[in-house]
Image (cartoon, grey):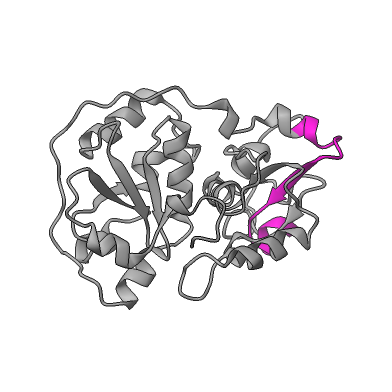
Amino acid sequence: MSQYAHPEVVVDTEWLENHLHDPNLRIVEVDTSPELYKNAHIPGAVFWHIFTDILLPDLSINLDAIAFANLMSRSGITNDTTVIAYSSYPGTGGWIFWLLKLFGHNHVKVLNGGYQKWKSENRPLSPELSTFSSVPYQAKTPDPQLRVLPSEVQASMNRKNSILLDVRTPQEYSGEWFFNQPPKKNERAGHIPGAVNIEHILTFNEDGTFKSLPELKSLYESQAITPDQEIFPYCAIGGRSGYIWFVLKYLLGYPQVRNYDGSWNQWSRLSNV
């Protein structure tokens, strides 16, 4: 992992097992259902539900600083706590990294390989629910340097040095699917004109870990996505693209990357595009 542009933001399973009892460390499991967490999770991990703790009912990301501060507070996380993010799906940790950075939390790392690799190595798991006393937490307003608005996406379509990166499945990109199924009435499927499609799962190894720096460089440079350009990744609801923001900015060191967190959920509903 030392080969990455910012190796300090990635931890492996061995490191985490050796630091499970660090008093200033909080492990956060993020998923769409608590069932897996209830059965067996990394000891000491607190659970965040994607649909109730992170997303609003319309599937947009909750960007309210007070709501975020409350989530951190009830998770026993102070402004100085180091957060280790993971999920049963490896890319989610990178999305949570983006979310915490968005609200100004500087101490956050991603577990390489997530739950998949941890379990495959027979590392300790716990069935006991992890709860913590609430602690003071102060969140900053969302950092505009980490996200892009639809008006900026529109403006970028006419700039040679800007790239829209669609990280969804080929079926979503082609319009065959709207999210994970064929579009229903009034759902507009497809992609933003000019967007390049590189599915986010191409950045993983079979064990859920990140591919090496040379492999990642080859993946993106083969599609003319280079560090000298401004890159706006997007997906369906901003999660997969938040992960690719992490890959491009922290693993590859690309300087000009902002997540279009509104993504297709927002773009497909705009009447003027």
- Left or right of 4 in this view: 132: left
- Left or right of 158 in this view: 24: left
Above or below — where is 126 with respect to 228? below
- Left or right of 19 in this view: 252: right
For the point 27% across and 56% down, the residue is 34
Residues 107 and 208: in front is: 107
For the point 76% across and 52% down, the residue is 225
Q: Position of residue 2 (x, y in %)?
A: 49, 60
For the point 60% across and 40% down, the residue is 259
Residue 149, picture quadrant: top right
For the point 12% across and 59% down, the residue is 128
Region of the chain picked out in magenta, as a range? 154-176
Q: Is residue 108 magenta?
A: no
Q: Is residue 30 among what the camera can see?
A: no
Above or below — where is 205 with respect to 236? below
Residue 269, picture quadrant: top right
- Please state the total of marks drawn on the protein image: 0
Outermost residue on the front side: it is 2
Quadrant of the snapshot with the C terminus: top right
Q: Is residue 117 among what the camera can see?
A: yes
Q: Position of residue 247 (x, y in %)?
A: 57, 53
Residues 180 and 84: in front is: 84
Q: Is residue 174 magenta?
A: yes
Above or below — where is 265 with respect to 90? above
- Left or right of 46 in this view: 234: right
Residues 113 and 71: in front is: 113
Q: Position of residue 182 (x, y in %)?
A: 63, 59
Q: Position of residue 185 (x, y in %)?
A: 64, 48
